[in-house]
Image (spheres, rainbow, N blue to C red):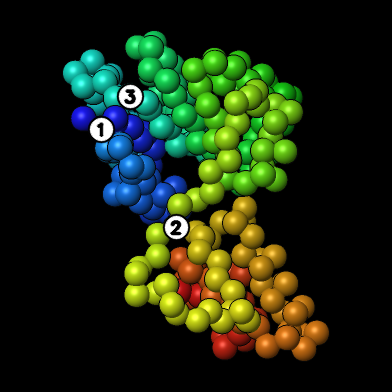
Amino acid sequence: MPKHVLHVGPAETRGGMGNTIQRWCNHPPEGWAADYIATHRDGNWLAKFRTWIRAKRQLIQRIKSHPPDIVHIHGATRASWLRKRKCIRISRRFGLPVIYHIHAGNFDKFLCSWKGMIAKDVNRVLSDPKITTIVLTKRWKKILCKWIPEPISIVPTALFSHPENKKTSRDRFRFLLPARPSPVKGHKRAIEMTLELRKRGYDVSLDLSCVGPKHRDLRNTDNEVIRGH
């Protein structure tokens, strides 16, 4: 009988976090099974609110009827933290170990908001020894460890390549930024770096996945060099 992990987060929402949850549910670690509860959806505020209320109820019912071995909660900042904070509390109330997975690239700024009150709250919640915090890189662990208690583990975003692509040669001069069009994702910075490299004589190009051609960061750029999809 495999162990079971229950992912909790925006599994059905467009974006990197939802894609990550879906990949991990489709490709769980050996000896594990996985499924998810979606806490967010694309749409208006009423649809989002209803999804959250339903998710909270589903989490309680699921733990009571078929408790998983571990609850893996995926979160970001602002309202996401408030929702996931509640999910953490519910899971721990039933004695389940929790993984809290930080996906936000601006979590440090979030911790510094509200005159440090957010940092104190996050630290208090995540100080539970049955909670393990996950960050995406060593750099983020170094930044966040002054606010977030150990244990902090590093788990890069999972990528699964198609078998037919394993022997495909890679173009070292073509860059890809797969991210939603948000300032925190760094599209503007990526464009600036690409243009600077071209000024220095490097024949590089940049593909901005998940960004429409009318995105503000693409204005006044060469469409053959900077491409939005």
Q: Earlier in the sequence, mark 3 or mark 2?
A: 3
- Mark 2: which secondary structure? loop
Q: Mark 1 highlights which residue?
A: 2
Instruction: Kindly indicate the quadrant of the structure image that contains residue 2.
Output: top left
Q: Identify the secondary structure beneath mark 3.
A: loop
Name the residue rendered at 29%, 49% in the picture: 26
Residue 40 sits above or below residue 14 on the image: above
Is 98 situated above or below 30?
above
The residue wearing badge 3 is 69
- Label 3 sits on what residue type? Asp
Q: Position of residue 113 (x, y in %)?
A: 69, 31
Q: Is residue 70 visible?
A: yes
Of residue 216 and residue 66, the one placed in the foreground of this image is 66
Q: Disc 1 or disc 3, which is closer to the eye? A: 1
Q: Residue at x 50, y 59 (%)?
A: 180
Circle 2: residue type: Leu
Mark 2–mark 1 distance (CA, rounded to whole Å): 23 Å
- At numbered mark 1, what does the secondary structure look like: helix, strand or loop? loop
Quote the CA–CA distance across marks 1 and 3: 10 Å
Q: Residue furthest right?
A: 200
Residue holding disc 2 = 159
Q: Earlier in the sequence, mark 1 or mark 3?
A: 1
Residue 140 coordinates in the image, percent (x, y): 66, 42
Q: Quadrant of the C terminus?
A: bottom left
State the residue in front, 178 or 29.
29
